Amino acid sequence: FFWFSFHDEVLLSLYYLFRLMTMDQKHLRSLSMFLAHYFWVASMQAEVASAFLPPSMRTIFSKPVFSSKVSVATREGFQSGNIGKLSFLLGAYSDSIPISEGSKPKTHQGDETSGQDGVTSISARISDLIHQSSSSNTDVLTQEKGIEQAEQLLIQWIDDYRSGRNPNDNNGSNYRAEEIVDAVTFDTLIRGILTLPSSFQNIPKGDADNAIERVEQNILHDELRSLIGKGKSSSAKKGNQIVETYSKSDRATFVLDLMESFHEPRGDIYDEVIASHGTDALDCLSHVTGPQFLHVMSDTDHSDNSKQEYFNRAWKSAKSALQLLNRSEELYRETGSLSSRLPSISSYVTMIDVWKAIAVCAEESDRDEGRNDHKRDEAMEIVRNLRQRRLEVYSLESNKDDNGNDIEEASGRYNILPLWATESVDGVLEFASDVIRENVPTYQPKREFSGERPSKVGTWHFNQVIFDLGEYPRSFSGPLAQDLLEFMVLKVRKESPRVKQNDEKIMGAMPIVPKPNTDTINAVLKAWMVTPGAVDSARRAEAVLAQLATWQADGTLWGVNPDIVSYNTCINCWKESGIPGAAERATDILTLLEDETTDVFPDVVTYGSCMAAWAALGAGRRAEEILLRMYKRSLEGSSSSLPKPSTRCFNAVFLAYANGKEEGRGKRALELLRFMERLHSEGYEDVMPDTYTFNIVMKALTNCGEIGAAQKARQLLRRMEDSNSDGDIQLNPDSLSYNTVLDAFAKEGDAVSAEKLLNEMHSRTGKSMKSAVIAKPDTYSYTSVLNAWAKHEDKTLALKKAEELFNELERKYAAGETDVRADSSVYNALINCWAKSGDRKALYRVTQLLNLMEELGLQGGDSNVEPNSRTYCTVLDALSRSKSWKAVSQSLEILTRMEEFYSEGHECVRPCARAYSIVISTIARSKKKGKAELAQEILHRMESEYRKGNDSARPTVYSYNAVLNAAAFTNGDEKEQEQAFKVACLTFDELRNSDYLRPSHVSYGTFLKAIEKLMPESDVRNDLVKGLFRRCCRDGQVGDLVLRSMKSLTTPDLYQSLLEGVADYGLPKSWSANVRERDSKLRT
């Protein structure tokens, strides 16, 4: 039925009706579209076609997109009799059709995505689209599609809202036109746009036509521009020039324009769009001045023009960012200087950096070519203007509260302080103390002495409360500390006479007020640093220093200067923030101090914090660069006060190499250790390798994957043992030292060396050592040795040694010779040895060990030996590798037991996706009759478990691929193969329509293999393969497996026609953009 050509249209309709009657509403919607298009296109009976559609869907046929695209595609499908092509085409286009009220899924209690009348909230629909697109981490095309759908939905709503139309009556939009899209939805859409890939690109000549085609597809963004009164986008240019398309920054700006028509955006959303424009500008400038420009451009006379194109694009991006900053400042002033509308200090920093870079680039261009001289002057003027504007905005001249009311005694930028508390100094301190006391019951303010209040409240009392906010981190610590600082500054301004610098006589006559000092500033910075959940704490800390510069400039806090503690705290804020670019920003502050721009110089803590910031990213070489900068600076200066490298600094770099993935990190860590030891021998007293140092270096060797790394780690351990034997207590090897080396041997499969080291640990324990702490073997030690034997080449010897080691541990524990007892990790390691051995007794032994763990742990109550998900997965993997005819039945039995134990409350045996996937793979490898249907049944069990709330059981692409594989390699009669092909079609369709998964290149390749094995050669099969391959190209999933399957499935002529004549010199990169495989180079 799948592969003979239909000539009876009625039979075709009845077949699809019969096939889809039992499926969900989404498939029935596809069926309605299919039948409607059939009578419309094939029979041209519009009335009959309309009868198949619900009322909310009938107007869809008046849309140009359906008449021009879907109808044409359907007509081609009817002419060729291609069922598969119709199924995939209609399945794709039906996704964009709104579900009718009758087929709409029910909402749960508390679900705010729909109203009582079943109409979906426009905000919820846009948010769902953004969320779904962001959940795909690797599929760029899917992410772009989701963002564009959200933009289109917003455009439709704005059009309906402004025209006063009811969308439910005329276009099937199925949302409330009178509903206003909330500000959060606009914010979400803008941030979703900004997560898209790079905004611009250089297009080679060969792709110029494709670039023009992409620009022609920018209809959505032209519609968006028309709504805000702007013209259409410019056309693309051929040749090696920039293609002027809509960048993500421009798209975000357009949505922000629309947002201003309905809401007053917060300052942070302006900041993000400004930062994106700034990044675009700097990227363009890097092509103008950087060496990579030589590689991007060709050897034609277009290079100069293209260089100017990049400069113009950078200028345009910088201008757009400047306009946004102007609007953000205007909104801040128009709304009464609300703190939520305040432009971030980072926006000013970004703009100053961008315009300075433009000025430098324009100066170089002027020197080389005599162009852009006026732009250089304009850029420098903008820089000066931005600096002045930053000082003006970050001043405390505002006299309105957050409600727009005029006030005299308090600033409108308070985050927490209420107006009534700011009437007196005592009232502010009392309020702050009460806030801390409410959240920390044991808190006692230090300014209260035996119940007596001080006669005067001054700077010390304020500083103490701000210090306490840092000592007791809460979500209000940073904001409240900021309020106290601003209140102190306000008091200084209102109660202190303005004095000129060096006017000490007037300064001595000033009344006593709680004037902030350097300790106050540092306490506020620390409060921001420790505030939990404050994603902008680093920027707020920098803003404090910027405010201090303003207060110094106007004389309010003359003489109050930041010290090295201030800058170190700010660097630590960036280090702890975890936001992208934090390490770079911390390094920028270090560079500022090194350049002597300020009167403060970096110390050991400054360098160490920057290195720790890079270490958190695993960027060993960047951390080492800072260390070498520190070392060279200490040599160049004559002062002994200049910071010198310390053990802590070296350890930070070693940690970066240990946690990173840089090539050659193990070798580099060893070289750095030798350099550290040389410095110590030269008199650097603070540079002395300790146990922690050696442990990190050995960890770097363990994780580097270099040949001989384990033996090098063993040599370091031996050095520690020798030094400790000579009385050096700084190098006392602990359990972590030995376990790290054991882990290194395990990763290399050197079981002999691992067991030898374990025996040395036992012998070392029995000796009298000078050190007070002796490293003893623990369960991790035994587990590492067993894992080493699991990778040993001689499997027979490995099993023997593993069993002996396990029995020895059990015997020693029973005899009281050791307090180390075999736990779940040791049992899992022994099971792993048997599972990978290939021994004929492996299945018996692994099931025996599993039964023992279930008996002792799950049924006997011994939590130390409870099996976990890893245990079951290892046993299931052993069954999957075996050739036993009982493998399928035993796997199903173990999986069922796992589900039952979990349902009884044993959380440790939670069924996971890997367990289900292994069972499906076991079924696929078997010769069991009906294995495709059985594999599909396990997949549905897996999906059901996930729907019940077990997130660990969420199906993966590997799970679907295993079912496709079971269907592709089904042997049997014609009926069984027909059923297997049905399973393959339905499984692939479920994967394609999944809410959280997308087909991979393996999915496409396996499905093509199923078509090859289960579908006879015919024109119908060729048409199905064509449609599937084109979809694969659009999804960017053309990998090696797909190409190999296509070669064996099609004729050479058909294969070459599908590749569109590009096979000789490589496929378009977009075809394989989302392929993740070891050899990404496609060969045809």
Image (spheres, rainbow, N blue to C red):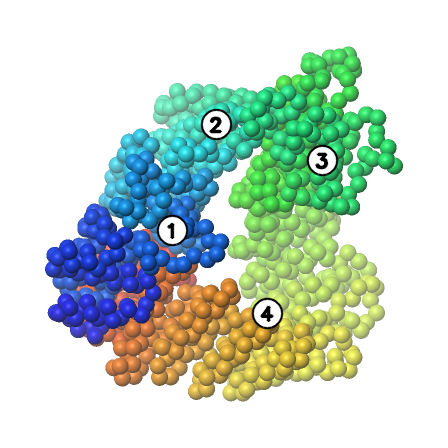
Disc with the residue nearer the chain's start (3 vs 1): 1
Q: Nearer the viewer, residue 588 or 639?
A: 588
Residue annotated with mark 3: 432
- The amino acid sitting under disc 2 is Leu
Q: Quadrant of the N terminus?
A: bottom left
Q: Residue 498 lies in what quarter of the image?
A: top right
Check the image and report above or below for 1053 versus 611.
Answer: below
Q: Amino acid at mark 4?
A: Glu
Q: How many marks?
A: 4
Q: Which badge, 1 or 4, comes first in the chain's sequence?
A: 1
Disc 1 on helix, strand or loop?
A: loop
The residue that mark 1 highlights is: 117
Q: What residue did someone put label 2 on?
A: 331
Residue toward you, 958 or 95:
95
Residue depicted at x 63% and y 45%: 532
Spatial distance from mark 4 to mark 3, Cα to Cα? 44 Å
Q: In whole angstroms, how far apart are the C-alphas of marks 1 and 2?
A: 38 Å
Mark 1 against mark 4, which lies toward the viewer?
1
Residue at 21% across / 54% down in the picture? Answer: 70
Closest to the camera, between mark 1 and mark 2, is: 1
Residue 907, labelled with which disc?
A: 4
Mark 1 or mark 2: whose residue is earlier in sequence: 1
Q: Is residue 736 left or right of residue 167?
A: right
User: Mark 4 to mark 2: distance in Å?
Assistant: 53 Å
Residue 780 can be seen, yes or no: yes
Instruction: Estimate the spatial distance between the alpha carbons at disc 1 and disc 4, rounded to whole Å.
Output: 41 Å
Residue 696 is situated, as x and y percent measured from the top left of the image, at 65, 57
